[in-house]
Image (tube, rainbow, N blue to C red):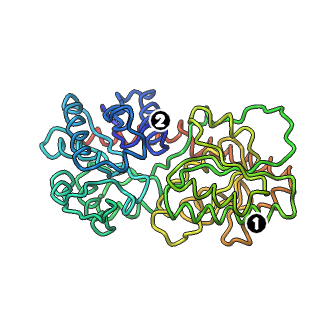
Amino acid sequence: MKVVFIGHSGYSYPHVRVRCYHFAEAVKKLGIDAEVLSFKDHIAPSHYTEEIMYDLKDLNKVYLTLKAILSLMQKKDYVFYIQKVLFHASAPLFLSRIGRNRYILDCDDWDAQYCSLYRNRLLNKFFLGYAAGSDKFGNINSSDYENILKTVASNAIACVASSNTLKDSLSKYSKKVYYIPTGVDENKFRKKDNNTRKEKIRFCWVGIVWGDVIFDNMLFLLHCFSQAKRFNKDIELKIVGSGQYMHRVKEIINLVYKNDDIEVIDWIEPSSMPDFLSSVDIGLIPLIQEDNFWINSKSPTKLFEFMSMGIPTVASRVGEIKYVIEDGKDGFLASSKEEFISKIETLIKNPSLRKEMGDKAREKIEQKYCLNVLGKQLFNVFKELERKL
């Protein structure tokens, strides 16, 4: 089987980095002819940032789609691996509709309300199979997005879901749905010896603060850390990331938490992240919206990176995370603010527990969530589908 992995964003965003670039690399080593087409990296003008990619006008989207169609026209014998249903899916879906290619749909998020489709209903109808409408910000309402997802998933030869929630959702539309989490490159994300003596125990959060959902999680995180700091002066928090709402996080820190040893670090290149994480003692992943479908659908990429680095993590007992962490063994799960703070303090006071949890977290990655294991799973999916094409 020959496969083109097609993504909206560039290498810097984890959904494309892992589920396009890394997956393609993994199956290529096993004998699959695989390549990547990223709209951000290969189709869009070089000055387009990720923020621009999510805020394009319809005319620009159509232009990029036509460029992609011309590029993909040369891949007649390939199966398209469509990562997400955003506007970039228009190109492979168009070629599939005219009978040139088959496709596999990969979902790592529930992108309704946060997705980048077309504002024009007719364009959504023509390219994506349903006349979805949008608000003034370009967000598609949830029911319209689900209709598009139903159309795309039902016409795919198979679907790949990154979470149990997404697998259940896609199974309503497709008889062939495979569960493959996002995982991590276990060779790159391996703790390096760090002989530099640190005066403080270092906590870390990594991510993109793109809207209210993540911003609310950041407020929760700042409060929990500040409470722990009151009785544990030898701790510090590094917040690494970017996003449209990161300036609000900085403002809150300066107004309320400026004496709590909290530092915001601008986005670190993916290639440099393992070096930075080698200095981290404890990871934090707060997700307070337990009934939010988007939160429950996400595959916890940063958790996998923390675990691969041997970093014990305190995370909310929400979504896919609760299937990954075994509470008290290879990490901590928390259901409330009080429990979150309590488990932070437990790790502060127990360096031997931090080491034990970190080692067990690394073991779990090597057994279940590393690129080597997930690549073989995807390879087996391709081989199974190839026999039936």
Q: Nearer the viewer, residue 345 or 45?
A: 45
Q: Judge from the rendering whether residue 309 lies leftward or rightward of residue 111; answer left or right.
A: right
Residue type, label 1: Ile
In terms of image quadrants, where is residue 68? top left
Q: Which residue matches tag 2? A: 22
User: Residue 128: horizontal and vertical position, in percent?
Assistant: 21, 54
For the point 37% across and 49% down, the residue is 54
Tell me the CA gap for discs 1 and 2. 35 Å
Q: Nearer the viewer, residue 355 or 72?
A: 72
Q: Nearer the viewer, residue 237 or 164?
A: 237
Q: Secondary structure at mark 1?
A: helix
For the point 34% across and 27% down, the residue is 33
First in sequence, mark 1 or 2: give its number.
2
For the point 33% across and 53% down, the residue is 116
- Kindly check if marks 1 and 2 are in contact, taking CB atoms under 8 A apart as contact: no
User: Residue 120: horizontal and vertical position, in percent?
Assistant: 20, 58
Residue 313 bears which disc, if any?
Answer: none
Q: Is residue 217 above or below residue 57?
A: below
- State which mark lies toward you, 1 or 2: 1
In terms of image quadrants, where is residue 381? top left
Residue type, label 2: His
The image quadrant where one finds the C terminus is top left
For the point 80% across and 63% down, the residue is 228
Q: Which residue matches tag 1? A: 341
User: Residue 127: horizontal and vertical position, in percent?
Assistant: 19, 51
Q: Which residue is outermost to the left?
A: 98
Q: Secondary structure at mark 2?
A: helix
User: Residue 278: horizontal and vertical position, in percent?
Assistant: 72, 38
